[in-house]
Image: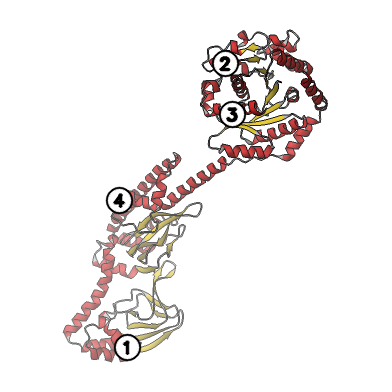
């Protein structure tokens, strides 16, 4: 890191420090390297240092049902531990090296030594910043309708149990049939809920955006995922293991009420979906394919705003249905064209056999012999 | 010189009797002297189209074949007895005769049991041609390739095979064409009937001609209106502008000009 001082000046926690103190602290940083799999710190441990990744990759993990689950990955230029440095709060997550990694380390003691030399006023300011950093995270959680009405201490509990996952565009969050062991809440971005028909064509059942909950069905009934979820945009989701969620539900039953409201909204949407699919199927049965062409022009992967009515949202999600209808129409037209072009197939072996069985009789031989005579006789008349 | 034209189909249900009646009627309308012989002794039917029933019929082909009367007595003059059907009024004064087969079940089973003298049939038809000074004698045959049918092919100048555009008819028609060739029938025509209107009729004609090496005299559409009318009249006379009627007139034209 060429200009550590400059970098530190950009960090929220160093903002109120005078420049010479930052320079002094920069000199206190030591270097540490980690091999793949080395643990930097564990979840729940009190914070004792600030880390800045300069090379490699660190995995942020939290304890899950089956060991640790990766909630984030951070590369060079990322600072770890700002939030908890001053108050020695327990780490909200663990950190493990995913590659050979080099870090710059500032011990809490060194930081606190400088901190204690600050005027009281600045110390207060720093403590506030530190708390704001944590509250900021809590605010994000509070924006999620599911957690909106939780008391502060509940959010604090949640912060230590919740994971964060980034998805690239088109990345799969989970597949249909996967074990449903976590609840997701979309923080940023959009995802689509999909199924595949018998031909393997993708069918979009719904699109979900910021604040919406995913995977709640599997959490409740423990049946494998009924549908898959794929990111439509770069997406960030918060996630909570099934056990953590159930425990949380017991502690804060108000969440159940919100969940019920969400489930009922989803159900209404599904009913609307079914109604429209039936209505369109009826049209197909009557030979009316006219709607497919106009509908198909609307792209399936475009994001449909939440402002629209369920009906128009559903229609736009039936893209696969419309292309299926187009396929039916095309096949029917091809069949018609085929019928129009008459082709004649004659089984030549059978033809010869039948002719031979007819011409082989005595009657036929006689008839053939007399045919000439009969005609000549006629001509004489 | 008179021409004998056998109308045949390998399977039933091709619209053979209706086609024969309409074709004969159209040729008669052109001023020709025409007779139709119903040799479908097993299941006669063409008389109905001319308004004949068992009561009006009088003598039949069966009487002649049993030696009970000369063939001239069997010929029923349609031009003089058109009945009250609208289309048939056009036939008043035309030279069109029908030699019906008996509807009597006893007569039918007798001929099925004993068969009939092929030579006698042949002589009778010859007599008829002379006595009525016929230009055209149409023979409505029983479907399939039985002995009577083979005989009618032998005594015919022209064989018209009616087929529907379906695979079973294609196969049977192929056999019939081979048999007719083997019997040296002087002229042959195919007539495609009951073609669905969504077919390209020119393509049907070309494909059928190429498959059998036989000229197609006409491709006639499936005619629901004919079904609607029942068997009460001669369709092409009642609805002369109907596509089916136009088609049958084309076949009549082919007969008058080329056969």
Q: Quadrant of residue B141?
A: top right
**Residue matched to label 2:** B91
Q: Residue at x 53, y 42 (%)?
A: A336
Q: Secondary structure at mark 3?
A: helix
| Both marks 1 and 2 on one chain | no
List the residue tagged with mark 1.
Answer: A3
Q: CA distance from mark 1 to mark 2?
A: 115 Å
Which residue is pictured at 57% across the width and 36% down the height?
A: B201
Q: Quadrant of residue A52?
A: bottom left
- Furthest toward the left, the residue is A121
Q: Which residue is mark 3?
A: B250
In this view, A82 is above or below B117: below
* Whole-percent x, y for residue A353 in the image: 76, 36
Which residue shows up at 32% across the image and 51% down it?
A: A265
**Which subunit holds the residue at mark 2?**
B
| Label 2: how many Cα within 10 Å (few below 14, some 14–19, many 20+) | many
Visible in this render: residue A245? yes
Q: Nearer the viewer, mark 4 or mark 3?
A: 3
**How far separated are the C-alphas under marks 4 and 3?**
63 Å
């Amino acid at each position: 890191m060429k200009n550590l001082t400059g970098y530190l000046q950009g960090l929220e926690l160093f903002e109120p420090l005078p420049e010479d103190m930052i320079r002094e602290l920069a000199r206190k940083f030591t270097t540490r390297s980690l091999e793949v799999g080395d643990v930097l710190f564990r979840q729940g441990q009190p914070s004792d240092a600030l880390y800045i990744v300069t090379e490699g990759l660190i995995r942020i993990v939290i304890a899950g049902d089956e060991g640790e689950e990766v909630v984030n990955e951070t590369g060079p230029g990322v600072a770890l531990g700002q939030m908890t440095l001053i108050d020695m709060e327990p780490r909200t997550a663990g950190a493990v090296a995913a590659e050979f990694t080099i870090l710059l380390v500032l011990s809490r003691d060194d930081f606190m030594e400088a901190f204690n030399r600050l005027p009281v006023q600045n110390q207060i300011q720093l403590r506030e910043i530190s708390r704001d950093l944590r509250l900021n995270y809590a605010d994000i959680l509070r924006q999620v309708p599911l957690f909106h009405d939780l008391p502060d201490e509940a959010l604090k509990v949640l912060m230590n149990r919740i994971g964060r996952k980034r998805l690239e565009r088109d990345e799969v969050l989970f597949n249909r049939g996967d074990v449903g062991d976590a609840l997701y809440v979309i923080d940023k971005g959009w995802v689509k809920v999909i199924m595949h028909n018998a031909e393997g064509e993708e069918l979009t059942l719904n699109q979900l955006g910021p604040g919406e909950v995913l995977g709640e069905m599997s959490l409740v009934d423990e049946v494998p995922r009924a549908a898959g979820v794929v990111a439509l945009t770069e997406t960030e989701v918060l996630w909570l293991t099934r056990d953590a969620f159930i425990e949380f539900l017991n502690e804060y039953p108000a969440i159940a009420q919100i969940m019920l409201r969400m489930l009922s909204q989803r159900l209404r949407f599904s009913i609307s979906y079914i109604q429209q699919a039936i209505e369109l199927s009826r049209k197909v049965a009557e030979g009316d394919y006219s709607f497919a062409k106009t509908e198909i022009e609307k792209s399936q992967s475009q994001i449909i705003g939440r402002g629209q009515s369920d009906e128009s949202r559903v229609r736009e999600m039936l893209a696969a249905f419309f292309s299926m209808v187009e396929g039916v129409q095309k096949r029917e037209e091809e069949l018609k064209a085929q019928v129009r072009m008459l082709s004649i197939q004659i089984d030549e072996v059978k033809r010869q056999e039948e002719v031979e069985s007819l011409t082989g009789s005595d009657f036929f031989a006689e008839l053939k012999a007399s045919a000439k005579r009969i005609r000549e006789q006629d001509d004489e008349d | 010189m008179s021409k004998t034209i056998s109308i045949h189909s390998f399977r039933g249900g091709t619209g053979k009797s209706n086609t024969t009646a309409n074709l004969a009627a159209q040729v008669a309308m052109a001023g020709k002297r025409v007779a139709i012989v119903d040799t479908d002794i097993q299941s006669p039917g063409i008389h109905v189209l001319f308004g004949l029933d068992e009561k009006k019929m009088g003598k039949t082909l069966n009487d002649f074949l049993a030696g009970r009367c000369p063939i001239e007595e069997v010929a029923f003059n349609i031009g003089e007895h058109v009945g009250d059907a609208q289309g048939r009024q056009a036939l008043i004064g035309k030279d069109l005769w029908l030699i019906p087969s008996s509807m009597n079940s006893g007569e039918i089973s007798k001929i099925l049991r004993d068969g009939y003298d092929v030579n006698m049939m042949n002589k009778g038809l010859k007599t008829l041609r002379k006595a009525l000074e016929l230009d055209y004698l149409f023979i409505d045959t029983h479907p399939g390739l039985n002995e009577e049918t083979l005989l009618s092919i032998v005594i015919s100048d022209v064989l018209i095979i009616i087929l529907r555009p379906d695979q079973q008819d294609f196969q049977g028609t192929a056999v019939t064409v081979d048999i007719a060739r083997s019997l040296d029938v002087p002229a042959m025509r195919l007539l495609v009937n009951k073609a669905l209107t969504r077919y390209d009729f020119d393509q049907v004609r070309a494909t059928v001609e190429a498959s059998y090496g036989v000229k197609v005299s006409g491709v006639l559409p499936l005619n629901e209106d004919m079904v609607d009318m029942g068997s009460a009249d001669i369709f092409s006379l009642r609805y002369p502008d109907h596509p089916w009627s136009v088609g049958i007139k084309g076949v009549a034209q082919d007969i008058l000009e080329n056969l």
